[in-house]
């Protein structure tokens, strides 16, 4: 009987249900073994029992963060894509979209623009990626993906501060509607929802920028 074991930080009941379902489906598809033969267990680890880069996770969550950035390279393409796919699976409107087409489009965008992506480094450890670009009359944060268990709110504030320091242009952010933690974090930084894209993503713009248009 195939056995899948997952160890992670605290998960909601909905997350655990979805994780077991998806892992079983993918493993069954790859191995050609019927789903009913798979056993899956999830072990949740306390923050003090889970360490990255020589520090327990609670130290990261307690704002003991040294955030730096590096330019992404072609070697990051698949890591960015995997994280982007994870966000799509978690927050995207998968049921009402062409999933394969969406993934293909995401991969092509990453592959084409990888040199404009940045790695987010927290206390010397990889923590995510973001894609920020500027044109003649606008600046856009097109994608910001943070690896668990790092603090989304803390990293968002740092990334936004860095992006704003690099441009005087009006800044637009794209964020999944279901990513409520990110939406609330952007609102606290002075951004407001200006539009909804296919009921899947919001565009958000700083209140100051909108009032000055």
Image (cartoon, helix red, strand yellow):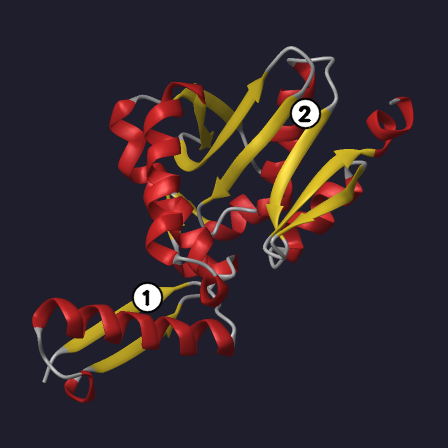
Q: Does residue 105 sit above or below 159 in this rendering?
A: below
Q: Mark 1 or mark 2: which comes first in sequence?
A: 1
Q: Which residue extends farthest right?
A: 211
User: Which residue ends up furthest to the bottom in the rendered image?
Assistant: 36
User: Could you tell me if the residues under marks 1 and 2 are in contact, i.e. CB atoms within 8 Å?
Assistant: no
- Lateral position of residue 171 relative to residue 43, left or right: right
Quarter holding the C terminus is: top right
Which residue is identified by label 1? Answer: 7
Residue 161: % across, % down? 68, 25
Q: Is residue 62 visible?
A: no
- Residue 205 sits in quarter: top right
Figure check: 31 above or below 180: below
Q: Residues within 10 Å of mark 2 (few under 14, many from 20)?
A: few
Left or right of 203: which side holds 87?
Answer: left
Would residue 135 be found to the left or right of residue 147 on screen?
A: right
Q: Residue at x 38, y 41 (%)?
A: 105
Which circle marks residue 60 in the picture?
Answer: none
- Which quadrant of the figure contains the N terminus? bottom left
Judge whether 57 appears above or below 120 on screen: below
| Residue at x 50%, y 46% (from the top left corner) | 150
Going 46% across and 67% down the picture, which residue do you hit? 95
- Per the image, the residue denoted by label 2 is 161
Residue 159 position, x and y percent, is: 60, 29
Residue 78 visible (yes or no): yes
Q: Nearer the viewer, residue 30 or 55?
A: 30
The front one of 111 and 181 is 111
Q: Position of residue 66 (x, y in %)?
A: 53, 29
- The picture quadrant where one finds residue 25 is bottom left
- Given residues 178 and 156, the one toward you in this image is 178
């Amino acid at each position: 009987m195939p056995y899948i074991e997952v160890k992670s930080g605290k998960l909601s009941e909905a997350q655990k249900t979805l994780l077991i379902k998806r892992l079983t489906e993918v493993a069954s598809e790859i191995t050609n073994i019927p789903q009913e033969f798979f056993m899956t267990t999830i072990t949740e680890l306390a923050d003090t029992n889970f360490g990255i880069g020589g520090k327990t996770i609670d130290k990261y969550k307690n704002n003991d963060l040294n955030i730096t950035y590096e330019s992404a390279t072609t070697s990051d393409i698949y890591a960015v894509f995997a994280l982007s796919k994870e966000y799509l699976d978690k927050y995207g409107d998968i049921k009402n979209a062409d999933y394969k087409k969406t993934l293909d489009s995401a991969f092509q965008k990453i592959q084409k623009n990888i040199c404009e992506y940045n790695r987010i480094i927290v206390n010397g450890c990889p923590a995510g990626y973001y894609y920020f670009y500027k044109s003649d009359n606008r600046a856009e944060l097109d994608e910001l993906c943070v690896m668990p268990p790092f603090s989304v709110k803390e990293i968002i504030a740092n990334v936004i501060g860095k992006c704003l320091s690099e441009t005087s242009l009006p800044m637009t952010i794209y964020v999944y509607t279901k990513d409520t933690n990110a939406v609330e974090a952007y609102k606290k930084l002075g951004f407001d929802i200006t539009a909804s894209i296919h009921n899947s993503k919001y565009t958000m713009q700083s209140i100051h920028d909108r009032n000055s248009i």
